[in-house]
Each structure stands twice: as C-alpha cells, then as structure tokens.
C-alpha cells in the first residue's frame, strides 16, 4: 500500500483522485454479488473526462452530507476513546505504485485495521443499531478499502450525538475480493484505452 498524505477534501486530494476509480464508487463497477454493474459505462466516461481535464467532476452534496463531514472528527474521537486506540489519518491510499484505483479511509488502526465513519440522520442511525449488520450500501466501499490497504478488518462506525454509536467489524471477504479485483482490472484496462482514444480525438 502507498499513502498520499494530503488533507482530505483539499485541492491536492481532489486532483489525486481525478480520473481513477475510488472505493466509494466501486458500487458503480460491481454489484454486491460480484457481477458487473450497469452503472459502469457512465462512471467510466466520467473518469475518462476527469483524466483529460485533470479535475474531479462535481459530486452531489446537501446539508446532511456536509453535516456528516463536520461531525466526522467527533465520531473518530469517540471511537478512539471507546476502544483505547489511536486512529491515524491519511489522505489517500493506493494498492501499489501503479495507482490504478484509490481509497480514502477515515483512519488506519495499528497494522491490521481501519475505520469507515458515517454520520447519518437519526432514523438511519437507529436502523443501523437495530439491524446490527453492515449496511448493504457500503459493502463494496468497505471491502474495496480492505483490498487496497491489504488490512484484515474495518470497523464501520455510525455516529449520531446523544445515541449509542454503532460499531460493526467487517473482515476480508476473500471470495468477493477476488471478483472485485478482477472487475477492477477489466474496468481500468478499458478506462486506459478510452483515455487514449479521447486524447487522439
């Protein structure tokens, strides 16, 4: 694993992510059962455009998302307190020198762990607590993060002030990771060819 130590959400961070798949969007490449996603082509076109312009495409944002970003340090601090650990913040992780795809963890823990933090609205947080499992929407992001960092586990953390935090440990799903890596390799191969085709236009 290679890390890029720039602040997340900084101009340098956005520039580093432009034109390459990121774990938060792996659901646009592969479904939860390991099949190619129907969103893959549109995502590929977006990344090809980013690679040409050198700029990350504008993403969706709203007050809830912005609130989550603001509360993340508070959630991280509570996690450290509960688990008596130190969470290392990094900007961006790549699996190797090729830097074909990336992951921005919410923190690394020791040699084997990492953390993924969400700060949802209260109804969603209560749902996570009661269902007591990794929300399906984040399966590919969490497993993708483990693929990229090579670590053994990720603690998925949901935080809302005034309510018990939800902490669920996710371990590597070796069978899914094989399928994910294969789909990423195919996607990145087509992406590189598409970028070259665009440059030749």
Image: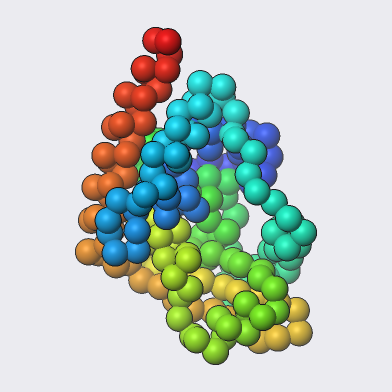
Residue 116 lies in what quarter of the image? bottom right
Residue 48 visible somewhere in the drawing: yes
Residue 119 spot, x, y in % from top left: 66, 69
| Residue for point 42% across, 55% down | 27
The colour mode here is rainbow
- As rendered, which of 84 and 153 lies closer to the eye? 153
Q: Residue 109 location in percent, x, y? A: 50, 64
Q: Residue at x 53, y 33 (%)?
A: 18
Q: Residue 117 is drawn in which quadrant?
A: bottom right
* Residue toward you, 132 or 190: 190
Residue 159 point in image, percent of width and height: 66, 75
Vertical order, 131 against 198 (above or below)? below
**81 to 71, vertically: above or below:** below
Rendered-image quadrant of the C terminus = top left
Q: Quadrant of residue 189?
A: top left
Q: Is residue 113 visible?
A: no
Relative placement, left or right, of 194 versus 50 is left
* 57 or 165: nearer the viewer: 57
- Which residue is most to the bottom? 130
Side of 34 where 6 appears, left or right: right
Q: Which residue is most to the top? A: 200
Residue 127, how many percent across, how many down?
58, 83
């Amino acid at each position: 694993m290679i890390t890029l130590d720039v602040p997340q959400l900084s101009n340098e961070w956005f520039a580093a992510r432009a034109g390459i798949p990121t774990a938060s969007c792996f659901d646009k490449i592969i479904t939860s059962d390991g099949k190619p996603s129907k969103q893959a082509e549109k995502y590929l076109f977006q990344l090809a455009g980013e690679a040409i312009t050198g700029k990350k495409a504008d993403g969706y944002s709203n007050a809830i998302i912005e609130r989550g970003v603001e509360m993340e340090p508070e959630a991280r601090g509570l996690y450290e307190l509960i688990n008596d650990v130190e969470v290392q913040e990094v900007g961006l992780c790549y699996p190797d020198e090729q830097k074909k795809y990336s992951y921005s963890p919410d923190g690394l823990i020791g040699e084997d762990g990492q953390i993924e933090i969400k700060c949802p609205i209260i109804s969603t947080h209560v749902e996570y607590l009661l269902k007591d499992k990794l929300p399906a929407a984040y399966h590919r992001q969490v497993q993708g993060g483990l693929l990229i960092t090579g670590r053994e586990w990720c603690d998925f953390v949901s935080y809302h002030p005034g309510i018990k935090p939800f902490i669920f440990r996710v371990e590597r799903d070796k069978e899914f990771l094989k399928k994910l890596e294969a789909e990423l390799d195919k996607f990145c191969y087509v992406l590189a060819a598409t970028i070259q085709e665009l440059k030749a236009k």
